[in-house]
């Protein structure tokens, strides 16, 4: 627990600032000062984690609308662009959400990289130390599943948002998101990549939600086991909800006939 409060300087990651001079663009800024501590980086991971988990659950639930048919699904995609009108212009709320999401994802990754470096810098090399195998395995899984997710998201945006990969020329439609999902996931390789990536997401959420609840101090001894179960159930439901779409496409349950 005490390790959470060790600052980067304490583990020798960065050279201390010369006396009388403070480093950084905003000397004395409390947000920057907090970011420089391990607990600050963990807080950034937890808060951005809440935003990302919220998005993932909403996106999974939205995707399930595809089972209501082409019209309903495309109307939902249009709603995401027109929501807030006429108070706010077309697509503005969607763009705000995109900026918040992108910033959250970048901060989440940045904090994860920094925390990994702090962990490595603090790791004694000269003698063997008894480490919790469970903690090490969970942390390793988080790194691998995190990298898999980052690769997936880049591919996914190029694929179903921009139509830049995975579609033959002219096959991507700017009118029908339903058509793009059915066409884009009809190949085995792409669908299996999506399903594997959702496996990575499930592992990431299983440990991530649990860890986030601990950082946010919502986890007490009394409800600890229940929160562990909750993280696992949410991760698994998100997995099932997401993979339902590529499986339905591969099985031929969704098609252009509707
Ligand atoms: C089987 C799984 C998934 C399917 C079928 C799917 C489907 C889609 C579709 C059809 C779009 C385009 C929506 C539109 O243009 O209106 C989209 C956008 C997007 N998806 Fe997914 N998605 C999946 C998983 C994920 C996951 C796991 C994440 C993140 C962890 C994710 C992140 C995004 C993002 C960031 C966008 C762009 C949203 C925007 O800028 O409008 N997707 N997805």
Image: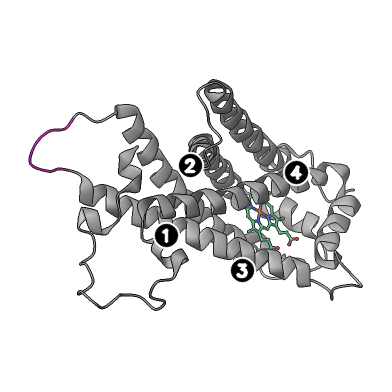
Dot placed on the residue nearer the N-terminal end, 4 or 3: 4
The circle drawn on residue 34 is 1
As helix, strand or loop, the secondary structure at mark 4 comes to helix
Q: Is residue 73 visible?
A: yes
Q: Is residue 131 above or below residue 59?
A: above
Q: Is residue 129 left or right of residue 101?
A: left
Earlier in the chain: of badge 1 and badge 2, it is 1
Q: Looking at the figure, which quarter contains the N terminus?
A: top left
What is the number of the mark on residue 44?
Answer: none
Position of 74 with respect to 189 (left or right) is right
- The tag earlier along the polypeptide, 1 or 4, is 1
Q: Nearer the viewer, mark 2 or mark 3?
A: 2
Task: Tell me which segment is drawn in magenta.
Answer: 124-129
Q: Nearer the viewer, mark 4 or mark 3?
A: 4
Q: Which residue is mark 4?
A: 61
Residue at figure coordinates x 44%, y 49% from the top left: 42
Question: Which residue sits at x=69%, y=63%?
Answer: 97
> Which SS class for mark 3?
loop
The reply to whether the C-beta atoms of the residues labelled 1 and 2 are less than 8 Å apart is no
**Mark 2 and mark 4: Cα distance apart in space:** 27 Å
| Sequence-first disc among 2 and 4 | 4
> Residue 215 shows which numbered tag?
2
Q: Is residue 90 left or right of residue 143?
A: right
Q: Which is more foreground, mark 2 or mark 4?
A: 2
What residue is pinned by disc 3?
Answer: 164
Q: CA distance from mark 2 to mark 3?
A: 39 Å
The CA span between labels 1 and 2 is 14 Å
């Amino acid at each position: 627990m005490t390790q959470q409060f060790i600052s980067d300087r304490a583990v020798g990651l960065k050279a201390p600032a010369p006396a009388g001079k403070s480093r950084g663009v905003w000397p004395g800024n409390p947000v920057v000062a907090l970011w420089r501590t391990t607990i600050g980086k963990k807080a950034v991971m937890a808060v951005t984690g809440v935003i990302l988990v919220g998005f993932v659950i909403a996106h999974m639930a939205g995707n399930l609308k595809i089972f209501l048919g082409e019209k309903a699904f495309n109307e939902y995609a249009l709603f995401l662009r027109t929501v807030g009108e006429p108070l706010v212009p077309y697509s503005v709320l969607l763009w705000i959400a995109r900026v918040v999401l992108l910033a959250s994802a970048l901060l989440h990754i940045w904090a994860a990289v920094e925390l990994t470096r702090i962990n490595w810098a603090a790791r004694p090399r000269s003698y063997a130390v008894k480490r919790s195998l469970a903690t090490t395995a969970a942390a390793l899984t988080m790194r691998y599943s995190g990298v898999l997710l980052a690769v997936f998201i880049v591919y996914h945006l190029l694929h179903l948002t921009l139509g830049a990969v995975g579609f033959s020329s002219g096959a991507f439609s700017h009118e029908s998101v339903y058509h793009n999902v059915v066409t884009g996931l009809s190949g085995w390789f792409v669908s299996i990549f999506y399903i594997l990536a959702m496996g990575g997401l499930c592992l990431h959420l299983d440990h991530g939600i649990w860890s986030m609840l601990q950082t946010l101090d919502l986890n007490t001894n009394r409800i600890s086991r229940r929160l562990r179960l909750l993280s696992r159930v949410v991760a698994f439901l998100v997995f099932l909800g997401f993979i339902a779409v590529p499986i339905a496409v591969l099985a031929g349950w969704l098609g252009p006939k509707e």
